[in-house]
Image (cartoon, rainbow, N blue to C red):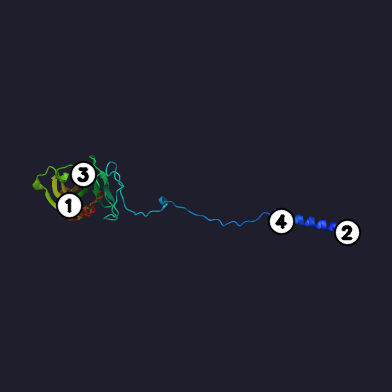
């Protein structure tokens, strides 16, 4: 009677051991999960580029063309706007309180400020370009006898200019003008500065005569900023 009981016990132990092994093998094996990483990729075209803040003035329609070639690496006068003519490849700056525009003939026109309280009514510069001309002189000298126009050659920042000046009068109005012309490759760029004043004695209370030297000081500053911007 004891032997069958022992056999039953042995069989029960075998069954329990086998069941435990099967459950152990059924458990999944755990694997380590690496921590998440994030990588930001910036293409070369997305790299930030350094920019220089430059006071600029968009040219009116019909003059100056595309200004993508302007300004150069540095501007001669940092806080002045500029006018750029990419068609002919030059740049000139003008005071911030000026007004850039065009005349009815399509000539670039810049109104310059005047000191108030005098007989000077307006001051402006007109920029003209002549191509394939025989001489590089200002259109303002047209119609004058040679003796009536003062002409001299001078160099500004290594560039040769023809400087001309003259005057005209009529009906109580006076026009004094100074022009600078420079050429390259058969093209002549001229900058004609005009000071328009009136007879001070035409007023009930005559205003003071304007200071010519003070009013024309800006001309030298502007011409000092002239640059060729294309080879």
| Side (left or right) of 1 relative to 116 | right
| Side (left or right) of 161 relative to 2 | left
Dot 3 or dot 2, earlier in sequence: 2
Residue picked out by circle 4: 24
Which residue reaches farthest top?
105
Residue picked out by circle 2: 3
Q: Which mark is residue 209?
A: none
| Side (left or right) of 101 relative to 173 | right
Which residue reaches farthest left?
147
Residue picked out by circle 1: 160
Residue picked out by circle 3: 129
Task: Where is residue 154? Give x, y as percent.
Answer: 15, 53
Asked if labels 1 and 2 touch by Cβ distance under 8 angstroms, the answer is no
Dot 2 or dot 1, earlier in sequence: 2
Other residues around mark 1 within 10 Å, as few (<14) / some (14–19) / many (≥20): some
- Between marks 4 and 3, how big is the CA–CA gap? 96 Å
Dot 3 or dot 1, earlier in sequence: 3
For numbered disc 1, what is the local secondary structure? Answer: strand
Q: Name the front one of labels 4 and 2.
A: 2
For numbered disc 2, what is the local secondary structure? Answer: helix
Other residues around mark 3 within 10 Å, as few (<14) / some (14–19) / many (≥20): many
């Amino acid at each position: 009677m004891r032997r069958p009981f022992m056999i039953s016990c042995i069989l029960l132990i075998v069954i329990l051991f086998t069941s435990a092994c099967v459950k152990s093998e059924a458990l999944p094996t755990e694997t380590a999960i690496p921590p998440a990483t994030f990588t930001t990729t910036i293409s070369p075209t997305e790299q930030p580029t350094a920019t220089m803040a430059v006071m600029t003035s968009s040219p009116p329609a019909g003059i100056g063309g595309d200004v993508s070639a302007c300004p150069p690496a540095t501007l001669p006068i940092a806080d002045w706007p500029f006018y750029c003519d990419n068609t002919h490849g030059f740049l000139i700056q003008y005071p911030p309180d000026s007004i850039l525009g065009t005349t009815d003939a399509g000539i670039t026109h810049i109104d310059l400020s005047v000191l108030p309280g005098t007989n000077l009514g307006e001051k402006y510069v007109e920029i003209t370009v002549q191509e394939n001309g025989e001489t590089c002189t200002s259109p303002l000298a047209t119609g004058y006898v040679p003796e009536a126009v003062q002409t001299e050659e001078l160099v500004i920042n290594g560039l040769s200019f023809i400087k001309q000046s003259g005057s005209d009068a009529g009906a109580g109005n006076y026009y004094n003008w100074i022009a600078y012309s420079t050429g390259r490759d058969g093209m002549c760029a001229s900058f004609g500065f005009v000071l328009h004043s009136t007879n001070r004695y035409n007023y009930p209370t005559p205003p003071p005569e304007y200071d010519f030297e003070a009013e024309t000081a800006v001309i030298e500053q502007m011409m000092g900023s002239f640059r060729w911007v294309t080879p």
